[in-house]
Image: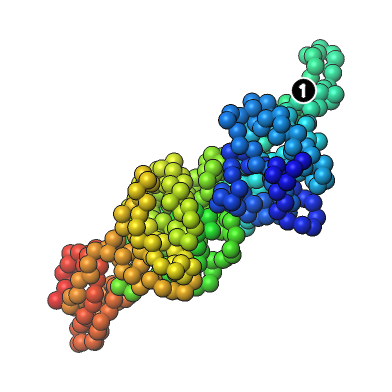
Amino acid sequence: MSDKQYSDIASGLNDVVLVHPHKSPETSAVHEFISLARAAGANPVAQLFAPLREFNPRTLIGAGKLEDLKDAVCQYGVDLVFIDHALSPIQERNLQNELGCRVLDRTGLILDVFACRARSFEGKLQVELAQMRHLSTRLVRGWTHLERQKGGIGLRGPGETQLETDRRLVQKRIRVLKDRLDKLERQRHQQKQSRRRNQHPVVALVGYTNAGKSTLFNALTGLDRAYVADQLFATLDTMVRAIKLHGGASVLLSDTVGFIHGLPHDLVAAFHATLEEVRDADLLLHVVDVSDSEFWDHIEDVNTVLEQIGASKQRLLVFNKVDQLSSIPRAKDPASPCVVPSGIYVSARDGWGMHELEQEIQRRLCGSAVVCRVHLGLDQGALRSHIYHSGKVLSDHPVDDGWDMQVELMPKLFQQLNEQHVLG
């Protein structure tokens, strides 16, 4: 095979060969797939580019490229091949028979990465459910020698094949996983009802994987609770924290799983309970890695998933990682059909632009703050505590019959206090 037909990626132990249908070298999609492979613990040693006019229904790639791939597998001695495209069960089986090694498509690779990243009990259940649903379409006849021939009245016939047994066991496991996730979903619903009673608006961070959502979450909360790493899908488990903005508003901030191009439908379905945090949020902060040359395509990919889950709430584009740019690119791409006209430019790592971001969050959720005088009686200590928690207290003086306070309130809290006749 010539050097033009495939290229070396890394030296060392031969581990995996990557195949890129409809891809050309040196694009971000190619680098992203290499990162996916490494995130799964593989060591890519070679990649094969296969520009196709049409897909082969039997093996996806054509006969010539298949021979090149056989040569690469033989030369590097790998026992695993990753295909940067979805494969049908028949295509996957035919490729494995032709190559004599395991073949994993893009969907299977993403599911494997999610399995490596899941930490919480719910996250592990969600990933396993997606894997089981994917596996249920991949069961092929390979155990016909184990057909059980039974005799006697009521037991005549070929019996149950191993394939049928596998299908039955997979479907049984799927039912168990769905039951457990349904129970967790009911618990999550109760938690959301409790949050609604506290009347705090919910802000959810969404965006392409590795856009810096967890770093931004830590910067806004002032904590280092969210795991941060320069890798795909570093965060899978949703984290919610109450924060108070500089303008005085109290909100709940939610960090969610990142999206990626070609996110498997089984995965979206399995994570539907987690993604409800996104769907039910009052404001979505769409975090974008502005240093990525193809960030407009990533915006479209994220918007596609948001439309799938029915997240139609207002969105604010947050262009992150401006510290990696020489200048801020404020011009929008006119070719992109889903450009949001306004956005905030920040560096979550350095803290640049965070004050402007908090101001914009408060403006969108609460409008303009109202400065007013509040007089509370001695029996209204709970309401005073609520004002401290949800508003901004400018002054607080005890008087004979209670407290006189000068406060800055959001319109919603101002209306509540006005109805209780405590405004001075």
Give percent across and percent down for residue 262: 54, 42
- In the rendered structure, the answer to whether residue 18 lies left or right of residue 368 reads right
> Residue 235: image x %, image y %?
56, 59
> What residue lies at 58% left-to-right and 28% top-to-bottom?
54
Compared with 108, 287 (above or below) is below
* Side of 88 where 160 appears, left or right: right
**Identity, as a three-letter code, of the amino acid under mark 1:** Glu
Residue 413 lies left or right of residue 285; in this view the side is: left
Where does the image place residue 296, in percent across and percent down from the top left? 43, 51
Classify the position of the N terminus by image quarter.
top right
How many marks the image carries: the answer is 1
Can residue 189 be seen in this snapshot? no
Give how far across and how far down residue 314 sits, in percent: 33, 52
In the drawing, does residue 419 fall left or right of residue 13?
left
Residue that appears at 49% across and 58% down: 292
Task: Give 237 or 31, whichever is nearer the viewer.
Answer: 31
Residue at disc 1, secondary structure? loop
* Residue found 68% across the figure and 55% down from its top: 38
Instruction: Identify whether 267 is placed above or below 417.
Output: above
- Specify whether residue 326 is in view: yes
The quadrant in which the C terminus is found is bottom left
Placement of 393 over or under 367, stated as above or below = below
